[in-house]
Each structure stands twice: as C-alpha cells, then as structure tokens.
Image (tube, rainbow, N blue to C red):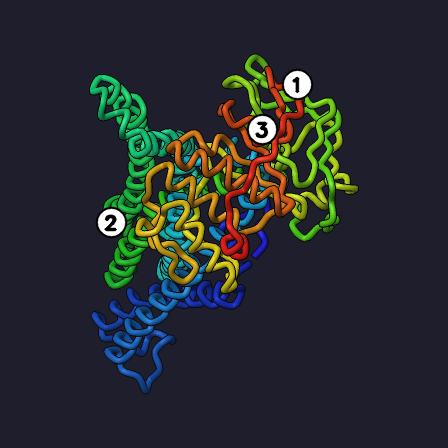
Amino acid sequence: MKLNNDLTLMKLLFSNSPSKLYASISLSIISGALYALIIPSILSGVSGEAKAHNYISNHISVEAFFFGLIALVLITKASSVILVNNLAKTAVARLRIDLSRKINSSEIAHVEGLGLSRILNVLTEDMGRLTNAAIAIPMVLVSTVTAIGMLIYLAVIDLEIFIYTILFIIFGLVLFQFPLSRTKKFYSKSRELKDVMQEGFRGLVFGAYELKLDKRKSEKFLDSEITSPTLESLKQEKKGDFILHLAGNSSEILCFFAIGIVIFLLPKGPDVEQQSTYGVVMALLYITGPIASVLSLMNQLKLGEISLNKINEIYSSGEVLNEEGQEIDKCWNSIKLKNIEYSYGEEERKFKVSVENLEFHKGKVYFIVGGNGSGKSTLCKVVSMHYTPSSGTYYFGSDEINLENIFSARGMFYSIYSDYYLFNGFYNSLSSNDVERIKYYMDIFKLKGKTELVDNKFSTIKLSDGQRRRLALLIGIIEDRDIYILDEWAADQDPEFKDLFYNYVIPDLKSKGKTIIAITHDDRYFHCCDEIIKIESGEVVESTPFYQEADSPLNEKESAVF
C-alpha cells in the first residue's frame, strides 16, 4: 500500500480491500434496513393485523417473520462489524509498516527533528485510535440506515409528524455542529501534550540513574515533565468529552420533545386511530437509539481524525530518497569534500560545519580531534552522508554524490557514534568463516560467557557500556565495510581494550585496505594514525600527517582467521 499525503480513513480501508469494504457497507445497510422493520413487525404482532402489511407473506406467520428478522439483523450486523474490524486492523498494521519504511527512508536530520516521542506516539497510540475509528464506521451506517428506515415508516403512518420530526432532527444536527467543532480544539491540544508525556516517560527510564541520586530533581522532573502534561492533557480531553456528551444528549432529548408534542400538543381528530398513535410513539422512541449511537461514536471518529492528521503530518514531511538509485564505483581510492557546508538549529543558535577541502584515502587511518562541541561528530556524519550538506561537492572515488547514488555510497560505511544503537544480531546470512571470526573476536574482546551467537542472534545484549561497544565493533568487522567511523569508541574501555583497539584492531583493519576515521582524545595513541585532523568551531583548522608503523602481534594462525 502506498501512502498519500491526503490519506483519509475510507481511502485507507479501500486501498487494502475494496471488496471487503463494499461488503461491510452493504451488510451495514441491510442490517439497518432490517432493524427498521422490527417496530412495524412488533406492532403487527400486537394488533394481530399482520395481513394489513405488505412486507409479510400470507404463508409466513408474524412470529416466524419477527424471529427471522432478529436472526438476520444479528448475522448482518455481526458480519459487517467483523469484516471491517479485520479490514481495519490489517490496514492499520500495513500503514504502520509503510510509515516505518517512510521514516527509515527519510534523512537522519528529518528523523531527529521529528523526535522519538512524536514518532512513537504516531506508531502506537494514533494507530490504535485509527483502528477504533474504522470499527465505528459500520455501527454508524447501521444506526443511520435504521433511523432512515424508521423515518420512512413514520412518513407512511403520519406525514405531519414525519415533517415535524425531520425539522427537529435537522435542528439537532445543526446545533450539534457547533460543539463538535469546539471539541476538535480540545482533543488536538490533549494529543499534543501526549508527545510531551512520551518524552517524560523516556526520561523516567533512561534518566533513572540520575533521578535516583537527587530527590528534589526527581520530584521536579516528575512534576514538570509527567504530572503537569498528564493532568493538562486529561483536562483538555475532559473538556472535549463534556461538550461532546452534552451536545449528544441534548440532541437525543429532542426526540422526546417530538414525542411530547405528538402526545400532548398536536390536535387529535376523532378519525385518528389509537394504533396509529402507538406506531408514531414507538417509531419516535426507536429513532432515539440510532441517533444516540451515532452521536456517541462521534468521539471515536473525531479522535481518529486527529490521529490521521498526525500520521499525515509525518508522512507529508521530509524528503524520501530513492533506495533503488544508481550504484557507485566500488573501486575507489579516495573521498573528497570540497566547499561543503552543513548547518542546523535555529537562527540565533545555528551551528555550521564548513569544509573547504578535505580528503580521505583508502587504507588510511585518520584521527579527528577537537574540543567538546567543536563539530567533530557532525563532520563525521557529513562524511558518512547521514547529514546532507546544503552546499558543496562530495566525491566518492570518481563519482559525485547525489540523491540518486547516495544510498549506494552509504553502504560502504560502518559507524559507531556516541548515540549508536546496538542490534541484537546479523540480518545477512553468515558463512562458516564468518562464524569462526565471530568466535575469535568474542574471545579477544572477552565477550565469551557474556553473550552467545544463536541463529544469527546474540543471546543477550544486556551488557556493560564497554562490552556493548565491543560487540558493536565486532558486528561492524564481520559486516566488512570499506570505511569505519568510530566516535570515541575507546572512551568507555579499560586500558586493556583501549590498547587492543589502537594496536591490534586498527592496524588489522588497515592491512585489509579499510579506511578508519576515529574521533579520539587519546593522544598517547596518535602514533597509530596516518593523519590528525583538528576541528574548531565547525572548521578544519589543521591536518597533520602523523604515523609510525605498529607491529601487529597477530600470529599466522590468527591472521588466517581474518
């Protein structure tokens, strides 16, 4: 299913299965029409004048007709609801998958701008509300057709009362529109606050260590980031509910006004049959149910509309790159950045990375150094093409990078940034040699006994920070990319593994023709690189060759494993 920027609930259902949608609508209409026949059949049974009504055959008893009618109503209504329920859940599941693909194909800067909390709310809560709104559709159709059927019956037995009733219903519907428009404002505000709440929940989990150490900070955090937005969201939702329910009940009561007018105010001539009056009263009473049902379902439909708007906002924003674009030449010797500029943030707090001329060669080791906030990570994310420059030229070998070949070029990189995500296994098939290499690296990284590889998945990734980084590097080595970008990988490592990284891993990757770009502050290991690149305030201020050959202590047997 392909999403559209103007996606509506009916379009969503139709795009998944037009036949099921049509079947559900048809069954809803039939169910509503059958529902409308219940009152006339009851009145026929009470009066004993079944033959006076054309809808009963002379060969069918009133009792058989009535109970058959009830059975048909049950079958058609249940079938309609079940059909649309299955259709809605399938459609929403596919929508969730398609939206996830859309997010995955969007630029990193766009995803970061949306924020995790907003994305999670759309993929979870909004999808649930959309399902509930879809399921309400057949119920609304059944109730609407039932009300129309009863109005037709009312017109047959008393045209004057029918006209009065129609006027009351029109008046009620018009009256209902004013509060309905107001509720959207309150529900929208409540939904916006749920994004704030989601961010607070993230802080509650990921900031647990810090919060445990400062009771005052913990209380302030809970109050401002969770309690306050939760209560305000509840307040806004209650306001919407209050207006909607008040308007709904008021509209429903109009039916009883109509009944009161019929019984107490309208003149009754001597020729007005009592049976006709009973029929009018029963019809009016019966209409109140469907009307109340439709009005009560407005809440679900309105929430579904707001959630659909949120989904459309995410879908319509951001540029999706062509994943099936051109392939770059895999035989490359260097990466060149010329007059590159990339900036982010608001005008008053904008940060810019500028690169006049920067070059990385295949099989070389580069250390990026600079103070905190100097732009080291941002520069590396421009190099790895996670961030798209606003100007300048990027050459990967002989290919100039553009929107058509950027996906192919990105496939040459493996990165571990400070905010990396550790996947719990491999998503490509592993050869027997890969498995042997994994065992070897798990041994030298001392991960044996901490986690095990089972069916391409690690048994656990609940490890210490240092162990998680070592496991992430292991995965990267096995994936065998051309360029490795490592953002202060050794910062969380013990001296043993820090030494292993600089004196064993980096030289070994280099010997295989890999390019390593590492952000580091470990000046005692600067001799392990070919070039040091210094960054200040987003600009490359110095690029200095610095290299001494380091003897690799890998023996012949170990080298064979690699």
Mark 3 neighbour class, 10 Å CA radius: few under 14, some 14 to 19, many 20 or more: many
- Mark 2 residue type: Ile
Q: Quadrant of the N terminus?
A: bottom right
In this rendering, the label closer to the viewer, 1 or 2: 1
For the question of whether residue 155 can be seen, the reply is no
Quarter of the image for residue 154 reads bottom left
Of the image marks 3 and 2, the number of the one nearer the N terminus = 2
Q: Nearer the viewer, residue 64 or 133?
A: 133
- Mark 1 residue type: Glu
Q: Residue furthest right?
A: 398
Q: Nearer the viewer, residue 163 or 466?
A: 466
Circle 1 residue: 542
Q: Residue furthest top?
A: 348
Check contact, mark 1 vs mark 3: CB within 8 A: no
Where residue 483 sits in the image (x, y, percent)?
A: 61, 41
In this rendering, the label closer to the viewer, 3 or 2: 3
Where residue 479 sits in the image (x, y, percent)?
A: 54, 51
Where residue 184 sits in the image (x, y, percent)?
A: 42, 34
Find the distance from the CA under tag 1 to the CA under tag 3: 12 Å
Where residue 85 sits in the image (x, y, percent)?
A: 39, 60
Find the distance from the CA under tag 3 to the CA under tag 2: 91 Å
Mark 1 neighbour class, 10 Å CA radius: few under 14, some 14 to 19, many 20 or more: few
- Mark 3 residue type: Phe
Of the image marks 1 and 2, the number of the one nearer the N terminus = 2
Circle 3 residue: 367
Of the image marks 1 and 3, the number of the one nearer the N terminus = 3
**Residue 554 vertical position relative to residue 428 in the rendered view, above or below:** above
Circle 2 residue: 263
Task: Tell me which residue sits at (39%, 50%) in the image.
Answer: 443
**Residue 24 vertical position relative to residue 324 in the rendered view, above or below:** below
